[in-house]
Image: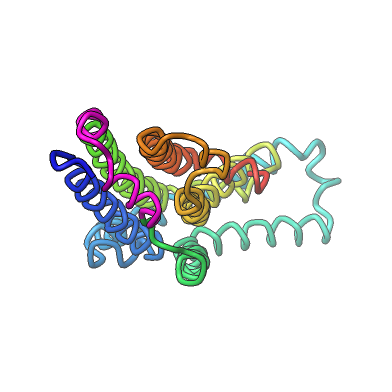
Amino acid sequence: MDFFSLGGVILDLLKTVVAFWNDKIGLVFEMLGQSPTSFKDGGPWKVISDLEPTFVAVGSSLVVLFFVIGFCSESIDVKEEMRFETILRMLMRVGIAEWLVSNNVTIMKAFFSTAGNLVNVITGTKFKKMKIPQDMQDVISNLGFGESLIMMILAVIISLVIIVCGFMLIYTVYFRFLKILVLVPYGAIAFSTTAGNRMVSHTATTYARHFLSVVFEAVTMALAIVVCNAFLNAGLPTFTSDYADWTKALMYMCELTFGITLTVGSVKGAQSLTSKALGL
């Protein structure tokens, strides 16, 4: 081993950024398993809870308006339409709409719990922290001075990329909570449209689909992280055994960077993937 080799320094730097990444992944899993009602000790949710009665009052008022719009658009002859089954159907539609407006938050909380439980199952039984394989640690530690100098520059760049990716991951998860919290109050208004005809009630369907895609986005995020970490823990392909040690180190560091950026990209696109997978 070269006395002036920087392999040990490179390895320590990589271990540090890998530990940083694992720490951020642990924080992300903890947040994904949380319900928005308990996020940040419930402070943001309290703001939404205080505003919710206002939106429910507006939604309850709109139920009557959308019912009249739906009735007028569907009725050609009022006398012909005033049959028992027609009146019963209208009353049921108004009752369902009012129930959805009044209990929309309770329904949403049930979906929050379901998504959180799925995330906890995925992260609790399938996740393995990322680590540098022992054979790669030996390769990096025994690099010569010339190779290790080049690798040191590359390791610094890679470390910066991993740190940025870690914070981007946290930002994406925080933004998901923001989307959910902003969406919740609009539920009362969106569900009030179910009192109208099919054209009007399409608003409630669109809202419900978007809401579900945002909620279950957490499950897709957890799956993406678990799968990408499995890629990283698998090490280099077997055909790399014919390459020189410094080439192996170079390929590993590039694969490490690629895997982490792939993880961030998968997490950022989780909502779109969820929508397509569930037909939302």
Magenta span: predominant SS is helix
Q: Report whether residue 188 is seen.
A: no
> In the rendered view, does 44 fall on the left or right side of 76?
left
User: What residue is at 29 percent from the left and 51 percent from the top?
Assistant: 18
Is residue 142 within the magenta segment?
Answer: yes
Q: Is residue 32 above or below residue 106?
A: above
User: What residue is at 38 percent from the left and 47 percent from the top?
Assistant: 176
Quarter of the picture containing the N terminus is: top left
Q: Is residue 100 above or below residue 117?
A: above
Q: Which residues are magenta?
A: 132-154
Camera-side residue of 143 and 254 = 143
Quarter of the picture containing the C terminus is: top right
Q: Report whether residue 27 is seen.
A: yes
Position in image of residue 93 (x %, y %) = 67, 57
**Residue extending farthest left:** 4
Query: Quadrant of the rendered structure where residue 268 is?
Result: top left
Q: Is residue 164 above or below residue 41?
A: above
Camera-side residue of 109 and 185 = 109
Position in image of residue 85 (x %, y %) = 83, 60
User: What residue is at 23 percent from the left and 35 percent from the top?
Assistant: 148
